Image (cartoon, grey):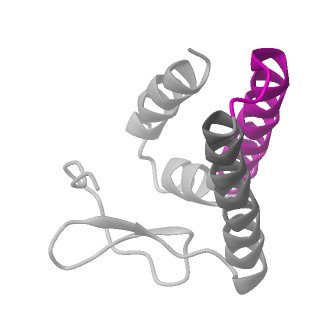
């Protein structure tokens, strides 16, 4: 977790809020949170499956294809979270005049695209 920058204020029903101890937190709808958790649970199962493939000495190409599937699933989680972040947190901070959120978002997007 990152601490909030200067001028950050607490938001009531926002996606991202700043608590009294200056820690930013997300507050997603139950639907979004459920979707993220379901996707991550499936990915967790895929990872366990990958481990099993390695333990069984499965042919490398088959394992690599499964790795690509896991990476795609993780990208899907990232896309959903990024979309929700942009539609709520980023918009709200911009409406409040906090343009620092643009640099924060660009930094995050650069990390996602590595």
Q: Residue at x 62, y 53 (%)?
A: 85
Residue 58 coordinates in the image, percent (x, y): 76, 29
Point out the image quarter for the N terminus. bottom left
Q: Is residue 16 above or below residue 97?
A: below
What's the magenta region? 57-84
Viewer-proximal residue among 31 and 106: 31
Residue 80 forms part of the magenta stretch = yes
Residue placed most toward the observer, 9 or 32: 32
Residue at position x 78%, y 44% from top? 73
In the image, residue 36 sits, relative to residue 83, either above or below, namely below
Residue extending farthest to the front is: 56
Question: Would residue 13 be found to the left or right of residue 60 on screen?
Answer: left
Dominant secondary-structure state across the stretch colored magenta:
helix
- Left or right of 45 on screen, residue 94: left
Indicate whether residue 8 is drawn in magenta. Answer: no
At a point 26% along the width and 51% down the height, the residue shown is 2
């Amino acid at each position: 977790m990152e601490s909030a920058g200067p001028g950050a204020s607490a938001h009531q029903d926002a996606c991202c809020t700043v608590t009294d101890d200056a820690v930013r937190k997300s507050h997603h709808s139950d639907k979004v949170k459920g979707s993220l958790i379901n996707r991550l649970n499936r990915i967790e199962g895929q990872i366990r499956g990958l481990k099993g493939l390695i333990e069984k000495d499965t042919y490398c190409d088959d394992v690599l294809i499964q790795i690509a599937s896991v990476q795609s699933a993780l990208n899907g989680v990232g896309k959903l979270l990024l979309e929700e972040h942009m539609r709520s947190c980023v918009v709200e901070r911009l409406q409040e005049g906090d343009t620092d959120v643009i640099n924060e978002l660009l930094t995050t997007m650069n990390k996602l695209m590595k």
